[in-house]
Amino acid sequence: MPRLASKKTNLKSVKFSFSDTSAKFVSLVGEFNEWQAGRNLMKKSKDGSFSATLKLAPGAYSYKFLADTGWKTDNSKMVIKDPIGNENNQIVVE
């Protein structure tokens, strides 16, 4: 469930990055966009990494990356299991 900020001033810029040199595209998918693939397409850099910056209200968010190579998590970030056993990344915005 997305967190709604009472004022826009509560929103924080949060940069997400992911590396998959074999991917042609990557979409950032999570609680902040109601798990809607395609709403937050990431920009590809020359080095093959992808990035996107979102404005988020404080709180904890589960998310994942959807690449043309499939669903991915970033094992260098916090990984949690949801109630049905899916692995997701989690970020805490303060």
Image: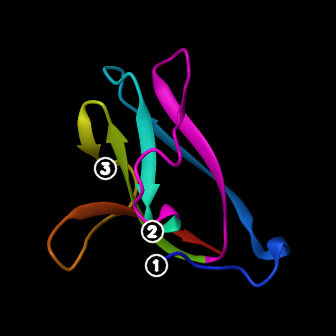
Give the percent coordinates (x, y) of residue 74: 35, 47
Q: Residue at x 59, y 42 (%)?
A: 52
- Asked if residue 62 lies left or right of residue 47, the reply is left
Label for residue 1? 1
Q: Quick one: 13 or 29, which is closer to the camera? A: 29
Among the two numbered marks 1 and 3 on one chain, the one whose residue lies closer to the N terminus: 1
Q: For the residue labelled by badge 1, is the local secondary structure a helix, a strand or a loop?
A: loop
Q: Amino acid at mark 3?
A: Thr
Splitting the image into 4 quarters, where does residue 38 fall? top left
Closer to the camera in the image, 67 or 13:
67
Amino acid found under the numbered disc labelled 2 = Glu
88 up-or-down from 69: above or below: below
Q: CA distance from mark 1 to mark 2?
A: 6 Å
**Residue extent of the magenta highlight:** 33-58
- Residue under numbered circle 2: 31
Left-right relation of 42 to 75? right
Q: Residue furthest top?
A: 46
Q: Mark 2, residues whose alpha carbon is within 10 Å: few (<14), some, or many (≥20)? A: some
Residue at 30% x, 30% y: name it. 68
Q: CA distance from mark 1 to mark 3?
A: 19 Å
Q: Residue furthest bottom?
A: 6
Q: CA distance from mark 2 to mark 3?
A: 14 Å
Q: Nearer the viewer, residue 11 or 76?
A: 11
* Contact flag, marks 1 and 2 (Cβ < 8 Å): yes
Say few, some or many: other residues with alpha carbon within 10 Å of mark 1 (under 14 / 14 to 19 / 20 or more).
few
Rendering coords of residue 56 (x, y %): 65, 66
Q: Residue at x 25, y 31 (%)?
A: 69
- What residue sits right under mark 3 in the picture? 73
Report the side of 4 relative to 33 (left or right).
right
